[in-house]
Amino acid sequence: MDDIGKAGAGGDGLPVSPGEDGVPAERDPNDPAEPGDDPRRIRLPAEQAAWDTLLEVGSQVVAKGDLIVLPTDTVYGVGCDPFNPAAVSRVFAAKARGRDVPLPVLVHSSRQALGLVEELTDSAKALIAAFWPGPLTIVLREARDLGWNLGQSEGTVALRMPKQQFALALIRRTGPLAVTSANLSGRPTPATVPEIMDQLDEGVGVYFDAGPATGGEASTIVDLTGPEPRVLRTGAIPPAEIDRVLAEARQVAEPVAEPPPVQPAEQPGETTPEPPPDPPAGGA
């Protein structure tokens, strides 16, 4: 998640929470770090019915302008309100990362993404339909007058919808989140929250712990701002799959040429009527 230049080429190696669709798995009883060691570390229960209070805690932390560590379907991420300049600066400072690598943004639906971009292109719609939620980041032209500064993005924004139920529920509550990998820039992203806490401490208001990450690949990043789609980073989705979906979308979009009208065949014994004679010169 840390290195690519334009919006989003930087950072979205976002940790797989064990369990189908990102539902937290049972905790490791041998984990020596207990939640009481730091009140900011909150273990996520598997039962979604128990998440409401935790979602409210996360929402309040984001609204306050503090950082949040959360599980996604790739790696653990550290995030904030993308419209809060001080919070965005805290992310860069916490990771010791320059603004030349802009922050990507996580959304909970394509409808939410639509409000953040200049246009949801046909290519974007095809890729979203095929791979969201999931490990695909798309780079598009950002909408005008958003009032955010996510780094040196050159007017673009990298968007992804993670396949992780707690992350989606939180983003639905908070709105879009600027999220990058939860690690110091240039270092591997830790697999566990206690390890993340050793690297990232300053400015983090809460760590949502869904158990050890299982080492899922980072998202594939596709730039859709140029004349042709371009893979900026190969990740969990192979480039061949990206090409296949885009080729199928182009086929559907191409208009089918109408065949010329068929003239009725002349039946035996029929003659083609002669055209009427030209009117006399000077006629009406």
Image (cartoon, rainbow, N blue to C red):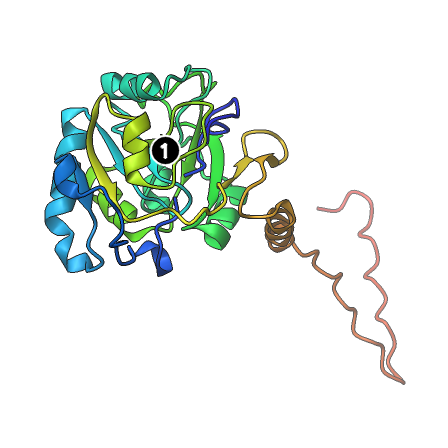
> Considering depth in this image, is 113 or 85 the residue closer to the camera?
85
Residue 176 seen anywhere in this rendered image of the structure: no
Residue 177: image location, x then y, percent: 29, 34
Vertical placement of residue 112 versus 278, above or below? above
Please report the residue visible at 41 percent of the width from the left and 27 percent of the height from the top.
142
> Considering depth in this image, is 113 or 188 the residue closer to the camera?
188
> Considering depth in this image, is 144 or 127 the residue closer to the camera?
127
Residue 168 seen anywhere in this rendered image of the structure: yes
Please report the residue visible at 51 percent of the width from the left and 25 percent of the height from the top.
3
Please report the residue visible at 49 percent of the width from the left and 41 percent of the height from the top.
219
**Amino acid type assigned to the residue bearing label 1 in the image:** Val
Number of marks in the image?
Answer: 1
Horizontally, residue 146 falls left or right of residue 35, namely right
Q: Residue furthest left?
A: 53
Q: Which residue is mark 1?
A: 105
Please report the residue visible at 89 percent of the width from the left and 85 percent of the height from the top.
268
- Please tell me in which quadrant of the rendered image residue 196 appears: top left
Vertical placement of residue 5 versus 19, above or below? above
Residue 157: image location, x then y, percent: 43, 28
Vertical placement of residue 49 versus 118, above or below? below
Residue 80: image location, x then y, percent: 26, 29
SS at badge 1: strand
Crowding at mark 1 (Cα within 10 Å: few <14, some 14-19, many 20+): many
Residue 103: image location, x then y, percent: 39, 26
